């Protein structure tokens, strides 16, 4: 029997914009201008680097085996932001220890991959040919990708697409859905604990269609056919625990966390991160234990816990 495996999850760090007014000014055309105005007016007060630093330090103290970050590292997709985010990722952890998927803010506008999320490729690369494998510093980022770590398979899905102003939708798309179905089916045959990482939730959270995944019904149908043991997301800047039906109606936990840099002002949820422990049961199946930690009074503290048991059939 394999030893217990622990991994951490946080999302939406929203790293600060580069100092000063971005240059050239033409970079602030269109949706970037709205995002920049929002940052200057309010968001820079909410997303605080000191809160994010405290979260990263708290995660490190718990020494997880792996770390998953589900998008929105940047704010308005300036090329300079992707460079700064790359440096932050290098400080966060080695690429084989940290897995990243992009969010809608990382796709505010179309940016050439070599100047955008391609800079994060080492943290978004699968560990087998056909799953985004190959040289982690070259080529395009392929989704979905798979990273096998102990008994866990992390499946990175991109929902990041540019959208119209005032929308924050996401889309998986037919080609990625086809590959995802084959991937989850194969990983299920291998008997691995499948963790799907995506920025947008595969269901509407608290009625917010303006921020929803456009093809969520297709994702739900796919998961009902293939199964998965856990889906992790961010995007909504609030904690969330829902369930979707898997094969035979078995429940798949869907867990979201608040922004990793959020300070509790204006009545908004404070920063959160989650620690998950996957334990293989002696008689077969799994046990998942979760600990949610939240920011309050300058430090992170335990907020809640839950546990899920899976028999050999995955229920």
Image (cartoon, helix red, strand yellow):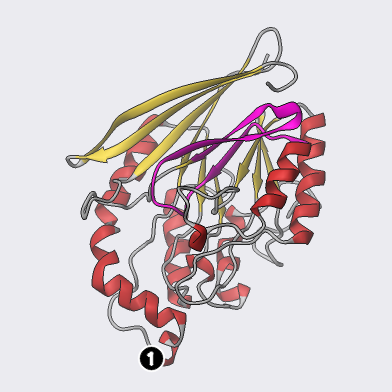
Q: Return the residue nearer the eye: 283 or 247.
A: 247
Residue farthest toward the front in the current orientation of the protein: 207
The image quadrant of residue 313 is: top right
The image quadrant of residue 114 is: bottom right
**Position of 256 relative to 235 (above/below):** above
Q: Residue at x 41, y 85 (%)?
A: 28
Residue farthest toward the top in the current orientation of the protein: 283
Q: Secondary structure at mark 1?
A: helix
**Position of 77 relative to 263 (above/below):** below
Q: Residue 160's spot in the image, x, y percent?
A: 58, 63
Q: Is residue 233 magenta?
A: yes
Tag 1 residue = 25
Q: Return the residue nearer the eye: 189 or 120.
A: 189
**Position of 191 relative to 207 (above/below):** above
Q: Residue at x 43, y 79 (%)?
A: 32
Q: Return the residue nearer the eye: 219 or 147.
A: 219
Q: Quadrant of the C terminus?
A: top right
Q: Residue 228's spot in the image, x, y percent?
A: 68, 35
Q: Quadrant of the N terminus?
A: top right
Residue farthest toward the left in the current orientation of the protein: 297
Q: Residue 136's spot in the image, x, y percent?
A: 66, 58
Residue range highlighted in magenta: 226-255
């Amino acid at each position: 029997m394999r030893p217990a495996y622990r991994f951490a999850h946080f999302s939406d760090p929203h790293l600060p914009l580069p100092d000063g007014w971005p240059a050239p000014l033409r970079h602030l055309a269109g949706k970037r201008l709205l995002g920049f105005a929002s940052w200057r007016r309010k968001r820079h007060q909410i997303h605080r680097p000191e809160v994010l630093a405290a979260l990263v330090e708290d995660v490190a103290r718990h020494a997880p085996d792996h770390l998953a970050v589900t998008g929105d590292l940047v704010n308005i997709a300036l090329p300079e932001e992707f460079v700064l985010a790359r440096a932050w990722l290098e400080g966060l952890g080695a690429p084989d220890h940290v897995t990243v998927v992009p969010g809608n803010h990382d796709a505010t506008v179309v940016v050439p991959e070599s100047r955008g999320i391609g800079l994060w490729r080492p943290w978004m690369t699968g560990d087998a040919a056909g799953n985004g494998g190959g040289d982690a510093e070259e080529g395009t980022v392929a989704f979905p990708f798979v990273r096998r770590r102990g008994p866990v398979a992390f499946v990175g899905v991109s929902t990041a697409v540019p959208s119209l102003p005032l929308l924050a939708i996401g889309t998986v798309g037919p080609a990625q859905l086809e590959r995802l179905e084959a991937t989850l089916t194969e990983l299920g045959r291998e008997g691995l604990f499948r963790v799907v990482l995506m920025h947008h939730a595969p269901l509407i959270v608290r009625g917010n269609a303006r921020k929803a995944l456009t093809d969520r019904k297709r994702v739900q149908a796919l998961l009902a056919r293939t199964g998965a043991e856990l889906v992790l997301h961010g995007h909504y800047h609030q904690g969330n625990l829902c369930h979707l039906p898997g094969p035979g109606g078995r429940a798949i936990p869907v867990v979201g966390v608040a922004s990793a840099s959020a300070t509790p002002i204006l009545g908004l949820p404070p920063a959160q991160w989650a620690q998950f422990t996957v334990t293989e049961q002696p008689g077969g199946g799994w046990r998942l234990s979760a600990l949610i930690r939240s920011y309050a009074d300058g430090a992170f503290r335990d907020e809640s816990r839950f546990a899920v048991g899976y028999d050999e059939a995955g229920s």
